[in-house]
């Protein structure tokens, strides 16, 4: 199981402990930089995107097939051949890829939705660095059905890539008797690059799902991620590219009808996005009368903790280029800027955004981004202006020094501002063990009318990893009353320490009867310790575990959780319908342990399952936790999944259950037309939510959505109590 959180114990010096233990059991290939010449063609020679590669112009391109296996047998020849070609004209970069397959009828291809994760599918990844600076780039992903997914690479951040970015590009894929074919067209107006150099960084990555095989063009080392731009090869010969200023107008129209508590109303909204590219490095966007009709609904959660829930951003305007605004790099640090605080009140209800502006880009070794938003009037608050500014200065080959500033208080009539400084050191080839090493430090402080004392936070972390070892350690301090108005903080008045350590082995045969040959065996230790600024232990959790994955992709994990929670005051845990009832957990120093079992089958199967079970003590009582999910992928046209989370809790003579369940249904009519149904239920609200979403991409940049949201009362024959329907159409005009 891929752990969702990597925790740690920190200070820069701590990372240096015993680096000699990071052995070199994996194969390290000789350093090489592969190069692929791009061939220029006339504008009238552009290939037709049909997934066939039969246009005569493709005969002009150089063909390369020098891919190397990364997994399961690092350094071996791939079992299936891959041939890659690159062409370009003044306006577009073209890729033609032939993915040979000796058994084309066994190709895994079941996803057709735009931006869906291609879990379990064969896929091909194109990774580009238009500045050749090892810092910022793009990723474009395709499966054999032509399902498209894209994202932004940012090497100075802990995350590998940001999948929230949606570029305007086009592709066609086709399965035939030799395997499958890809044709891609990338407009230069979509990409940021250095027009003064003719060489781009690039890498290419293919997954053959049924064999659990991955192959890579340049630097095929299993312990190093394909997203590491320092290990990219090169595309050469890219000269005289279109660098003129580009203006895009994106008008949209939304028609809506809502029915609530016996009354209904009809409304229409029109808005406009204006995007302007000053040069290949810098772009700006202005949005008027913003509308988010197509935004996905939040996942339902039941909160039984002392801390607020963090809801992720899902609105396109704030998702685009959001990696620029990430700050700190420490795993559990407070979030300096969380765009979810703009346009939503404290109850997560929409607040009209009259207009917003964003400018972002890179100039002379500086990455920067600015956002300014004007909110409509709110009772008792009035109209609010909110803003954030971020800059990161390149230091050395892979490191950066940055600052962030936010201004505005969205939920009161007061003022609040935050300033922060962060530093990220990165070395992709640290020590003879070929470690990917990163160290981070941050400091931020707040000035606000509503806060007193010294509202500041600071922390540091180190990460060192290869295929054999993974170490993360982090430490931070959050002062009393630290509450960023445009950010998020889980808890203040604390020291927090995190640790994650993993040792991976690759046995050559079975170690668990009936589980098949083991591909990897991981021994893990994860820990989190929180101490108040008054030096008493608030809580800790330690999680030693063992995880096995077989060569088919099935996973089993055993964990033993060791908890301590020192309550200095009574804790009221809400339960029941609308959280109207509560059980009080008395103040005390609680300690307990509980075993956990996790099992999942490989995602490449047409039918996959995931199961989680833990049981044991819980404060002064007990808790049982069950989670199960099923995903059925009978054909590319149909994906169906169900999940259920159930808890049985007993505390202080009170017994209650929590239940969250849901189902998804996806109908894919083509990679550009699909229907999604999301159904959710929880026993606290005792209601069912239904989200219907049809998306039609007429052509890249032109889209239409039909969205219907409903709430139904399960006690009254599932009668809808709320119905909201919206149609949104958007167009893109380029000048």
Image (spheres, helix red, strand yellow):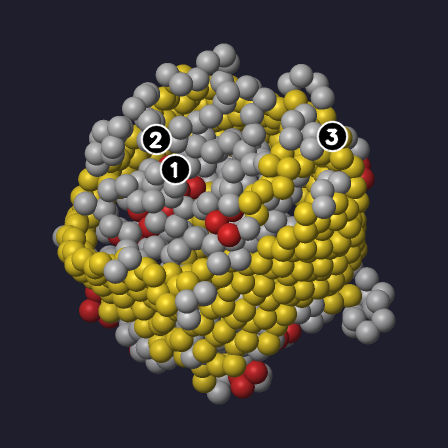
Label 2 SS: loop
Residue shown at 45% from the left, 65% from the top:
714
The image shows residue 137 at horizontal and vertical percentages of 42, 47
Compared to residue 165, the image places residue 645 above or below, namely below
Label 3 SS: loop
Q: Is residue 4 left or right of residue 86?
A: right
Q: Are marks 2 and 1 in contact (CB under 8 Å)?
A: yes
Compared to residue 109, the image places residue 580 above or below, namely above
The image shows residue 60 at horizontal and vertical percentages of 35, 71
N-terminal of the pair, mark 2 or mark 1, is 1
The image shows residue 651 at horizontal and vertical percentages of 70, 44
Residue 283 lies in what quarter of the image? top left
The image shows residue 475 at horizontal and vertical percentages of 64, 28
- Numbered label attached to residue 588: 3
Q: Nearer the viewer, residue 627 or 150?
A: 627
Residue 585 lies in what quarter of the image? top right
Q: Is residue 54 left or right of residue 622?
A: left
Residue shown at 60% from the left, 37% from the top:
572
N-terminal of the pair, mark 3 or mark 1, is 1
Q: Nearer the viewer, residue 724 or 569?
A: 569
């Amino acid at each position: 199981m891929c752990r969702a959180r990597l925790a740690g114990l920190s200070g820069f010096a701590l990372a240096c402990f015993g680096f000699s233990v990071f052995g070199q059991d994996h194969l390290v290939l000789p350093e090489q930089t592969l190069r692929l010449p791009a061939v220029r063609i006339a504008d009238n020679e552009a290939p037709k995107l049909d997934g066939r590669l039969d246009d005569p112009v493709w005969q002009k391109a150089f063909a390369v097939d020098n891919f190397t296996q990364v997994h399961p047998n690092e350094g071996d020849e791939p079992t299936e051949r891959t041939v890659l070609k690159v062409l370009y004209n003044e306006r577009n970069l073209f890729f033609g890829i032939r993915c040979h397959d000796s058994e084309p009828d066994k190709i895994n291809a079941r996803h057709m939705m735009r931006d869906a994760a291609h879990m379990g599918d064969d896929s091909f990844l194109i990774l580009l660095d238009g500045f050749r600076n090892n810092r910022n780039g793009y990723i474009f992903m395709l499966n054999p059905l032509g399902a498209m997914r894209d994202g932004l690479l940012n090497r100075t951040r802990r995350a590998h890539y940001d999948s929230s970015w949606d570029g305007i590009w086009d592709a066609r894929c086709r399965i035939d008797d030799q395997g499958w074919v890809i044709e891609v067209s990338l407009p230069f107006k979509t990409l940021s690059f250095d027009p003064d150099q003719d060489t781009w960084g690039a890498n290419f990555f293919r997954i053959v799902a049924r064999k659990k095989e991955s192959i890579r063009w340049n630097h095929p080392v299993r312990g190093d991620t394909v997203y590491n731009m320092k290990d990219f090869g090169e595309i050469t010969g890219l000269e005289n590219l279109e660098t003129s200023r580009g203006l895009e107008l994106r008008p949209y129209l939304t028609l809506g009808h809502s029915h609530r508590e016996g009354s209904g109303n009809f409304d229409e909204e029109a808005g406009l996005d204006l995007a302007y590219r000053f040069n290949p490095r810098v772009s700006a966007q202005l949005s008027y009368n913003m509308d988010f009709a197509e935004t996905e609904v939040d996942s339902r959660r039941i909160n039984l903790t002392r801390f607020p829930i963090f809801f992720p951003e899902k609105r396109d305007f704030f998702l685009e280029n959001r990696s620029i605004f990430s700050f700190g790099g420490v795993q559990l640090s407070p979030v300096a800027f969380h765009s979810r605080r703009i346009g939503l009140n404290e109850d997560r209800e929409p607040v009209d955004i009259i207009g917003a502006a964003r400018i972002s880009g890179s100039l002379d070794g500086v990455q920067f981004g600015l956002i300014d938003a004007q909110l409509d009037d709110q009772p008792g608050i009035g109209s609010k202006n909110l803003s954030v500014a971020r800059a990161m200065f390149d230091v050395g080959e892979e490191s950066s020094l940055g600052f962030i500033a936010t201004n505005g208080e969205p939920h009161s009539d007061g003022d609040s501002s935050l300033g922060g400084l962060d530093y990220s050191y990165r070395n992709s080839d640290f020590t003879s063990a070929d470690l990917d090493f990163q160290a981070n430090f941050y400091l931020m402080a707040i000035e606000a009318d509503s806060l007193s004392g010294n509202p500041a936070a600071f922390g540091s972390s180190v990460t060192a990893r290869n295929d054999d070892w993974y170490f993360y350690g982090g430490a931070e301090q959050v002062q009393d009353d630290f509450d960023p108005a445009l950010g998020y903080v889980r808890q203040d008045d604390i020291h927090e320490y995190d640790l994650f350590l993993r040792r991976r082995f690759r046995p050559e045969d079975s170690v668990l009867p009936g589980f098949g040959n083991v591909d990897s065996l991981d021994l893990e230790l994860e820990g989190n310790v929180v101490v108040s600024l008054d030096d008493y232990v608030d809580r800790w959790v330690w999680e030693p575990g063992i995880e096995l994955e077989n060569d088919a992709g099935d996973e089993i994990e055993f964990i033993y959780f060791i908890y301590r929670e020192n309550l200095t005051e009574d804790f009221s845990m809400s339960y029941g319908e609308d959280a109207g009832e509560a059980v009080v957990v008395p103040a005390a120093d609680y300690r307990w342990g509980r075993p956990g079992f996790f099992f999942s089958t490989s995602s490449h199967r047409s039918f996959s399952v995931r199961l989680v079970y833990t049981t044991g003590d819980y404060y002064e009582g007990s808790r049982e936790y069950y989670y199960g999910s099923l995903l059925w992928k009978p054909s590319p046209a149909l994906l169906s999944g169900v999940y259920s989370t159930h808890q049985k809790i007993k505390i202080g003579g009170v017994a209650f259950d929590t239940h969250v369940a849901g189902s998804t249904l996806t109908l894919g009519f083509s990679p550009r037309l699909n229907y999604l149904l999301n159904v959710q239920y929880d026993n606290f609200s005792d209601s069912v939510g239904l989200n219907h979403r049809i998306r039609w991409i007429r052509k890249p940049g032109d889209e239409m959505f039909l969205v219907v949201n409903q709430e139904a009362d399960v006690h009254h024959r599932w009668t809808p109590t709320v119905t909201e329907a919206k149609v949104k159409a958007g167009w893109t005009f380029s000048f």
